[in-house]
Amino acid sequence: MEHVFATRTGWSWGDHPTRPRAIAVACGGRATLAGDPGALPPAELAPLANHRVEAPERFLPLLAEAFDDVCADERMLYLQAAPPAGAPRVPHGIVVRRLTAADASQLDACGPDGAAAYGPWEGAHALAASGLGWGAFRHGRVQALVCTGFLGRRYEDLIVTPLRDERLWRLTLACLIAHTADVGARGHRAILSCASHDRPGRLLAWNAGLRPEREFVEYGVGLPSGMRQNPA
């Protein structure tokens, strides 16, 4: 929520301008619901179509009414709490460094992986110019990326590129260790979430010095109810 108000990105809704009973906040394909579900008309949730929604279990009937598909995803939240286990060896020709404004075109060239990272910033240029990310570069091209997806007053919620193989895992770990050091230098703490069954993601967090904080459920929602087209 803090990221939306601090960066003026995303979307928010409340049932009252000064004393809301319920609020919905969304940015970068993720959303949060809080308060009284009875104060949120299902139709008002339409902008959250195809989002990942974090909400208390009491919101589940509302989500089921508002969307055709609701899929629960059990996740683990890790919090920066210990020194990293040790920096991995970076192969020759790879440079691990902080993002600069000049990297925007390379983030764009990453396709869906890049879009997932800069989505909360509403553009590659905004993320690159923020400096709130580290990348592993080879011949100027991004191989792995870790960035602050959601910036709060005390915490920075991180996004990492997919861990498709061991080489990318090691490069991502190098980026994550460097970025969490930056986060700590800003007086913040890094947080990172992954699916409970995502062993590479859990190992990545642990080796970077993040420790399990809590488990939670995130709901993947589809189209608003009644909008799915029947096959011909």
Image: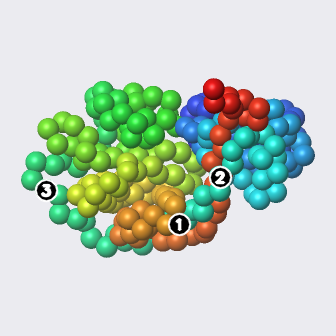
Mark 3 and mark 2: Cα distance apart in space: 39 Å
Q: Is residue 205 visible?
A: no
Counting residues from the start of the chain, the first of labels 1 and 3 encountered is 3
Kind of residue at disc 3: Pro
Find numbered disc 3 in the image and state the secondary structure of the residue it sits on.
loop
**Quadrant of the image occupied by residue 130:** top left
Q: Identify the residue under disc 2.
A: 71
Find numbered disc 2 in the image and state the secondary structure of the residue it sits on.
strand
In the rendered image of this protein, does residue 3 appear above or below residue 86? above
Q: 53 or 36, which is in the foreground?
A: 53
Q: Which mark is residue 196?
A: 1
Q: Which mark is residue 221?
A: none
Q: Identify the residue under disc 3.
A: 91
Query: Where residue 179 sits: x, y (%)?
Result: 36, 53
Kind of residue at disc 2: Cys
Kind of residue at disc 1: Ser
Instruction: Report the side of 90 relative to 231 (left or right).
Output: left
Q: 213 or 190, which is in the foreground?
A: 213
Q: Dot 2: few (<14), some (14–19), or many (≥20) neighbours within 10 Å?
A: some
Residue at 47% in and 51% down:
158
Residue at 63% in and 30% down:
231
The color scheme shown is rainbow
Marker count (numbered): 3
Counting residues from the start of the chain, the first of labels 3 and 2 encountered is 2
Q: Dot 3: few (<14), some (14–19), or many (≥20) neighbours within 10 Å?
A: few
Kindly check if marks 3 and 2 are in contact, taking CB atoms under 8 A apart as contact: no
Counting residues from the start of the chain, the first of labels 1 and 2 encountered is 2
In the rendered image of this protein, does residue 86 appear above or below residue 105? below
Query: Where residue 187 sits: x, y (%)?
Result: 48, 56
